Amino acid sequence: MKETYAWVTPPESVPASLKPIAAMQQKRFGAVLNPTRWWGRMPRLFWLVALFVGFLERRKARLSPVLRSLLMTRVSQLCHCAFCVDANSLRLAERSGALDKVQAVSAWRHCTLFSEEERAALAYAEAVTATPPQVDEAIKREMKRHFTDDAITEMTALIAFQNLSARFNAALDIPAQGLCATFKDKPHA
């Protein structure tokens, strides 16, 4: 049965230059991830974007893996990107070891699960994602309390990247793949 999509279909096959990443995704997730299929129309751009996110997700990043995933999940929600919410929620669940923060991230202001640092970062992510950005003096002060200038710069790049990714996917109606649901089925430490 052939899949149908709202208005822009992915290429029938992944270009040769994306085959290695498609094989990795197939092995880890059981399928090639939907954005890879759409970005396949522009493989060079795909690799530029992949290098950008790879840098932001490096081992020596200034932000913790949980914080990065938390911010990416919240931005995904704000941009109404079904695939991004799914994929970033899975990453947050894996990195935090539980689903509690995933389930609470949209209501973070009213939840005690988040540290002061996480709250400052989430407020900043929401302000940066607004159109136009709404980064007021109170948010700037709170950010300076918790983060260095280098960390704020890296966080801003991460938020901007997730806006690019989520808006690309949402605009093209790229669907979720049920990735976060798989977290419930896996054993956790």
Image (spheres, rainbow, N blue to C red):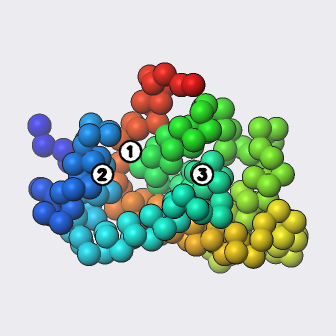
Q: Amino acid at mark 3?
A: Pro
Q: Quadrant of the C terminus?
A: top right
Asked where in the image residue 37 lies, by quadrant, the reply is bottom left
Asked where in the image residue 14 lies, by quadrant, the reply is bottom left
The image shows residue 87 at horizontal and vertical percentages of: 45, 46
Q: Secondary structure at mark 2?
A: helix
Mark 1 and mark 2: Cα distance apart in space: 8 Å
The image shows residue 148 at horizontal and vertical percentages of: 77, 71
Q: Secondary structure at mark 3?
A: helix
Residue 66 as seen in the image, left or right of residue 163 = right
The image shows residue 161 at horizontal and vertical percentages of: 51, 68
Of pointers 1 and 3, the one earlier in the residue sequence: 3
Number of callouts in the render? 3
Asked where in the image residue 36 lies, by quadrant, the reply is bottom left
The reply to whether discs 1 and 2 touch (Cβ–Cβ < 8 Å) is yes
Mark 1 and mark 3: Cα distance apart in space: 22 Å
Q: Which mark is residue 34?
A: 2
Which residue is located at x 81 percent, y 42 percent?
110
On screen, 65 above or below 97?
below
Q: Tell me if mark 3 has few (under 14), some (14-19) or many (20+) residues whose alpha carbon lies within 10 angstroms of its own.
A: some
Q: Amino acid at mark 2?
A: Asn
Q: Which mark is residue 134?
A: none
- Tell me the residue that label 3 is attached to: 65
Which residue is located at x 35 percent, y 48 percent?
175
Front-lying residue, 124 or 110: 124
Q: Which mark is residue 176?
A: 1
Residue 5 in view:
no
Q: Amino acid at mark 1?
A: Ala
Of pointers 1 and 2, the one earlier in the residue sequence: 2
